[in-house]
Image (cartoon, rainbow, N blue to C red):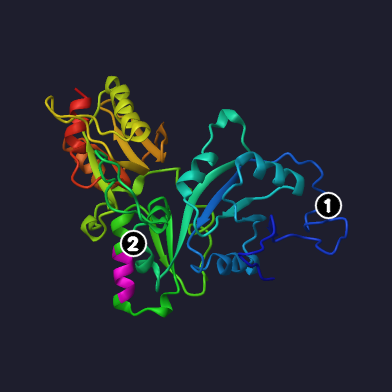
Amino acid sequence: MELLDDDPPDLVEVGAQNSNDPSNVMGLDPQMEDHNIAKVPLTLVTGYLGAGKTTLVNYILREQHGKRVAVILNGLDTGVAAIESLISRRGSFDYVILETSGLADPGNLAPLFWVDDGLGSSIYLDGIVTLVDAKNILLSLDEPAPAETIEEGQEHAGPHSTIAHLQISHADVVIINKCDAVSEAQLEKVQERVRAINGLAKMHMTQYGQIPQLEGVLLDLHAYDGVDELDTVGKGHSHLDPNISTVTVQVPLLHPDQLHKLESWLRSLLWESVLPSAEADQTVEHNLSIHRTKGQIRLDNGRVLMIQGVVDVFEILDHAVPATEEQRGREESGEKKTGKIVLIGKGLAGLPFERSLARALE
């Protein structure tokens, strides 16, 4: 079965049984008469046209992974309610993959699926996967800015960010496809550029959209379940791309009474795009845009919290962190581990985040 980007079906069900039953339109089990749907994870798949999204979907259709997967194509304008309604009409699924159009900004779509448990949604965002074409991604990132008119007295918004920048910056996983079409040196440049934009995302190299295993790469990402990988962040080189970068903010050990101050600081960053003043005689910093936020906060009473955020939606939750031997050794010696917040976005390089936070916590 071949899917075309230009004329996709609304939904493709994977791994169905009894597909020859004429009463079973989508090949669903006829015994599934009640449409009581359990909470289903959703992966948002983005990437330029030609990056290999359709090839990847075809690969999923052929692969034997034991899951009932709903693949929804070109879902840029498909909201949570529409997807839930569609799934309820077609039956129960273990997983949903939503493929966006080539020019989609995942930052506009992802928050739609980040809903509170109390709202009773049957789906939840499991992660964002971005496919990039190893041969053309650097050209896409370096696309010239469209012509713009700047009014008198108006400041320039800064370096131009392409859709490719936005798709990479929001990703939890970046799949660099068509690696066979470039040299090792070119592939290394692509990896460095991606890492400079997004220091949090896991990277996988593929050819023809074929992934050795779907779990952890496209399915079952659990991208918002924990923040244990933050210790590996910070190896990127922000100077490689002046548009979007990853910055790490060290957070001191906090007293519980300081949590509301931390939340207020985050609201200023994520809701107002403003970095609060780091000094009494300074004005606030503007013209920043946060796409992804992750953090681990430690309190002096031993409590550990995690921060997860997509664009202007964020939450702070209790986080159970298994202690490593190194951590236990530090605690036995009287050293208490501090926290960390990682931000991915535009206009972040060189801003005094740690001094701003320190002042906000006073």
Q: Secondary structure at mark 1?
A: loop
Within 10 angstroms of label 1, few (less than 14), some, or many (20 or more) residues?
Answer: few
Q: Residue at x 18, y 38 (%)?
A: 352
Instruction: Note whether residue 322 is visible.
Output: no
Within 10 angstroms of label 2, few (less than 14), some, or many (20 or more) residues?
Answer: few
- Magenta region includes residue 190: yes
Q: Secondary structure at mark 2?
A: loop
Percent from the top left, x then y, of residue 108?
48, 44
Screen quadrant of the N terminus: bottom right
In this rendering, the label closer to the viewer, 1 or 2: 2
Percent from the top left, x then y, of residue 188?
30, 71
Q: What residue is pinned by disc 2? A: 144
Image quadrant in which you'd find residue 6? bottom right
Look at label 1 and name its amino acid.
Pro
Q: What residue is pinned by disc 1? A: 30
Mark 1 / mark 2, whichever is N-terminal: 1
- On the rendered structure, is 350 left or right of 86? left
- State how many labels appear: 2
Q: Is residue 96 above or below residue 116?
A: below
Question: Which residue occupies the extreme right position in the image?
Answer: 22
How far apart are labels 1 and 2 at the CA level? Answer: 53 Å
- Magenta region includes residue 156: no
Range of magenta residues: 186-192
